Image: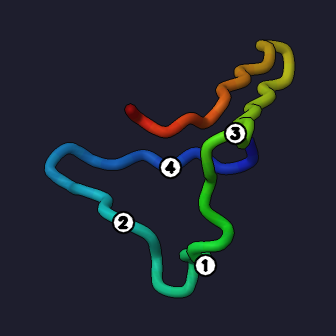
Amino acid sequence: MKRLTFILEGHSSWGTLVGLGCKPSKLMRSGDICEVKIEHVGTLINPIATQG
């Protein structure tokens, strides 16, 4: 991580900045895998599934 952002008490951050969204075809779907790697910590792997 190269940048750390602090939100001061009483301030809120909501949503996505203009122009940073994605197209619906790029959203995660059932069967996809979400993998997050943190150096010197480990890897978190979560399969994406629909509710039901």
Q: Where is residue 51 in the image (x, y as percent from the top left)?
A: 41, 35
Q: Tag 1: residue type?
A: Lys
Q: Name the residue under label 4.
A: 5
Instruction: Look at the numbered disc 4 and give the secondary structure of its residue.
Output: loop
Upstream in the sequence, badge 3 or badge 1?
Answer: 1
Asked if marks 2 and 1 touch (Cβ < 8 Å), the reply is no
Q: How many other residues sit within 10 Å of disc 3, few (<14), some (14-19) or many (≥20)?
A: few
Work out how far the residue at label 4 is from the one at label 2, CA to CA, in angstroms. Answer: 15 Å
Rendered image: mark on residue 42: none
Q: Quadrant of residue 23?
A: bottom right
Q: Mark 2 points at which residue?
A: 15
Work out how far the residue at label 3 is from the one at label 4, CA to CA, in angstroms. Answer: 32 Å
Q: How many other residues sit within 10 Å of disc 4, few (<14), some (14-19) or many (≥20)?
A: few
Rendered image: mark on residue 31: 3
Q: Is residue 13 left or right of residue 49?
A: left
Instruction: Look at the numbered disc 2 and give the secondary structure of its residue.
Output: loop
Q: Tag 4: residue type?
A: Thr
Q: How many other residues sit within 10 Å of disc 1, few (<14), some (14-19) or many (≥20)?
A: few
Instruction: Look at the numbered disc 1 and give the secondary structure of its residue.
Output: loop
Q: Nearer the viewer, residue 30 or 13?
A: 30
Q: How many other residues sit within 10 Å of disc 2, few (<14), some (14-19) or many (≥20)?
A: few
